[in-house]
Image (tube, grey):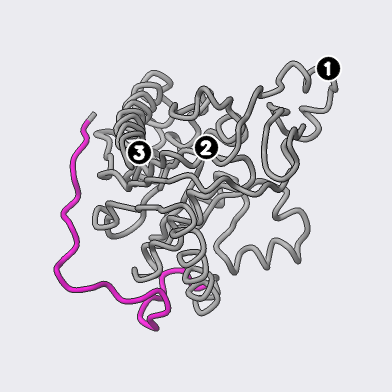
Amino acid sequence: MERRRVARSEGHAPPPMNDPAAHSLPERDEPLLARLAEVADKLFRPYFRADVRGLERIPRGAALFVGNHNAGLLAPEAFLLFGALRHRALSDVPYALTGDLLVAVPALERAAAKLGLVRARPEVALRLLAGDAKVLVYPGGDVESMRPYADRDRIVFGGRRGYIRLALRAGVPIVPVVAAGAHSTFIVLSDGRRLLRALGVGSRLRLTTWPISLCLPWGVAIGPVQVHLPWPTRILEEVLPPIRFERTGEAAASDAEYVRACAEQVESTMQLALTRLAHERAGWK
């Protein structure tokens, strides 16, 4: 197994997101994406005093962005990354794999696709990667985005390794994206797993947590479907060097031990970065 840096981009500035020359993702509404990225950057970056780094590490061609998920349904790290990419080529802006809720009906799914939100299915991701697109996934899902506040500076993927098998099958590098501070916009007191088991609705709703949290303006909130006013905590986010693996293809993806080793490499790399960024953030005045 090998991890190595991809050569940094050339000195000239990349074309903007709405550059007519960027045709690698034809299904998306490029002018709409450009406008929304500008809005996201102007709203989220100053509110969170955010710093998004490492965009020059984004490789050319297909890649799987893997991020740590935070703040419940708010996910400020996704908006900050999206806003930071506003001056990059559209080919650097990943499609985002999302749960069934956002694409529950055909009309909603078509609207979401214009924004680059696609159903989180391996066949969908493989088709995009085969078309030289970039794809963003948050493997931790609700387990990570609803993790207790005490674990805010931990990578919590819950043993999920489908993202590794996806990258190996597609033969593409993994680009880790790590955010520190994004899980401090509210306080999760408990992930509520016992409560979810008692309610008996976890499998039907495809959820593994039922959090109990403190958040604005509700005070105490129970359950994952909630909109909260985020505390304006500072967020540091960094795109790490791409990770490439020595073996790829179906045989590699079917080798459970190899998949486990690859996952350990990715998650330990992300944890080291999260710890570093959390320490920097704690010392910021």
Element type where label 2 sits in the image: helix
Residue 198 has which mark?
1
User: Crowding at label 3, few (<14), some or many (≥20) Cα neighbours within 10 Å?
Assistant: some
Question: Relative to 244, is 114 above or below?
Answer: below
Q: CA distance from mark 1 to mark 2?
A: 28 Å
Amino acid tagged 2: Ser
x, y percentage for residue 283?
31, 35
Q: Which residue is drawn at the image coordinates 19% and 50% (left, top)?
A: 6
> Is 160 in front, or is 165?
160
Asked whether disc 3 touches disc 2, contact meaning CB atoms under 8 Å apart, the reply is no
Element type where label 1 sits in the image: helix
Residue range of the region highlighted in magenta in the rendering: 2-26
Name the residue beneath numbered marker 2. 184
Q: Is residue 154 magenta?
A: no
User: Relative to 142, is 236 on the left or the right?
Assistant: left
Q: CA distance from mark 3 to mark 2?
A: 12 Å
Q: Residue furthest bottom?
A: 20
Q: Residue furthest right?
A: 199
Q: Main secondary structure of the magenta part?
A: loop
Q: Which residue is drawn at the image coordinates 45% and 39% (left, top)?
A: 181
Name the residue beneath numbered marker 3. 281
> Is 193 in front, or is 108?
193
Nearer-N-terminus badge (3/1) = 1
Amino acid tagged 3: Arg
Q: Which residue is drawn at the image coordinates 38% and 41% (left, top)?
A: 178
Q: CA distance from mark 3 to mark 1?
A: 38 Å
x, y percentage for residue 218?
75, 41
